[in-house]
Amino acid sequence: KLIVAFMASGKPGAKALAARLKGLLMSLSDARVVLRLFGLPPTIQWFQATVSGPAAADPLTVAQIVSMFVYYPMEHAWWAGKHGGIPMSAETGNRLSLWSCRAWLFYILIDAWNVGRDLLCIHKQLLDFNEVALDDKTRVSVQVDKQLKERADLLTRKRKALLRALTIVGDAPLALTWSLEGGLLSDFWIGAFGTLSSITGFVSLWEKTLKQ
């Protein structure tokens, strides 16, 4: 979409190509909406695991899950109405689209809080490790080896949290602009933030694939 925005502001030939690419992107967007339908079953499992665990459920986690229970049905009802799958007025479709994006934005804001909290906790733990002075004898001890492994695990957690933070930076402006009547961002910025979100999502998926 970022490339399309660039081309649309160029010469007539580039604008024509941009129009064709925009049509292709709309088809890809439809495919992504359909694929997101498969995100509902894992969300149901997440809810069941959260509320049935031995510890009391975290209210923020429950709120996140509920926001997805709002987001998924509304988005797919909007999509079905847009394509004539179910009878729906343009006004109803617009409201469904707005409120599904508001539910998504609510989820993102809670996720941002969780990521920020995780990063602060990890930072504090890393500072504690850095304050430990090791002499030559303790360097070879089993205890120190365990501490070094824990520190490496913390660095891995920090990198994953930072990647999540970048995803939030990409997703939050999109959710906000699509939550408002008339939007907020131009096609250029929608493309820019969407590109950032796509890259971080690809990196996360790639890392999960490598672990399998």
Image (tube, rainbow, N blue to C red):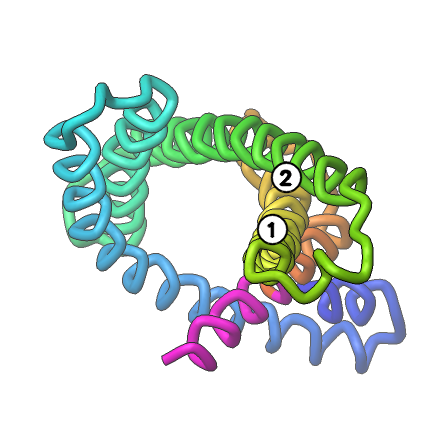
Look at the image and give the residue range highlighted in magenta. Answer: 199-212
The percent coordinates of residue 88 (x first, y second) are: 22, 37
Name the residue located 36 percent from the left edge and 68 percent from the top edge.
31
The percent coordinates of residue 60 (x first, y second) are: 38, 21
The percent coordinates of residue 66 (x first, y second) are: 27, 27
Above or below, comparing residue 98 to residue 17 in the picture: above
Magenta region's main secondary structure? Answer: helix
- In depth, the one of 101 and 111 nearer the eye is 111
- In depth, the one of 39 and 203 nearer the eye is 203
According to the image, label 2 marks what residue?
122
> What is the distance, in whole Å, between disc 2 and disc 1 at their CAs?
6 Å
Is residue 8 on the magenta stretch?
no
Q: Which mark is residue 154?
A: 1
Name the residue located 85 percent from the left edge and 63 percent from the top edge.
9
Q: Amino acid at mark 1?
A: Leu
- Location of the N terminus (image quadrant): bottom right
Is residue 201 on the magenta stretch?
yes
Above or below, comparing residue 134 to residue 95 in the picture: below
Above or below, comparing residue 5 to residue 52 in the picture: below
- In depth, the one of 166 and 17 nearer the eye is 166
- Mark 2–mark 1 contact, CB under 8 Å? yes
